[in-house]
């Protein structure tokens, strides 16, 4: 038989959303930093290259 679930408190909801937003902000900052370093030529990042089959 279906039973209603307990309501999630506003603080728990807000904490979960804040964690998600913080992770997104950190990843956005990393991407921006990488983009800036590539533009200035100071990057040591190696791009992953898709392996292509050689036609011989």
Image (tube, helix red, strand yellow):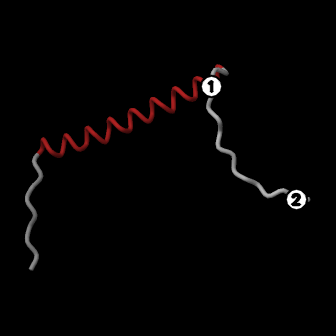
In the image, taking residue 32 as reference, residue 43 lies left or right, namely right
In this orientation, which residue lies closer to the viewer: 7 or 29? 29
State the mark number for residue 2.
none
Horizontal relation, residue 5 to residue 19: left or right: left
The residue depicted at 69 percent of the width and 50 percent of the height is 50
Residue 43 has which mark? Answer: 1
Q: Where is residue 34 in the image (x, y as percent from the top left)?
A: 55, 29
Q: Where is residue 5 in the image (x, y as percent from the top left)?
A: 10, 63
| Quarter placement of the C terminus | bottom right
User: In the image, is residue 17 above or below residue 43?
Assistant: below
Residue pushed farthest bottom?
1
CA neighbours of label 2 inside 10 A, class few (<14), some (14 to 19), many (20+): few
The residue that label 2 is drawn on is: 55
In this rendering, is residue 10 above or below 4?
A: above
Distance (Cα) linking label 2 and label 1: 32 Å
* Residue 39 x, y percent position in the rendering: 64, 24
State which quarter of the image contains the N terminus: bottom left
Q: Is residue 29 left or right of residue 39?
A: left
């Amino acid at each position: 038989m279906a039973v209603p679930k307990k309501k999630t408190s506003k603080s728990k909801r807000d904490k979960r959303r804040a964690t998600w937003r913080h992770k997104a902000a950190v990843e956005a900052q990393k991407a921006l930093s990488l983009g800036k370093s590539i533009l200035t030529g100071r990057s040591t990042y190696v791009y992953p290259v898709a392996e292509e089959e050689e036609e011989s």
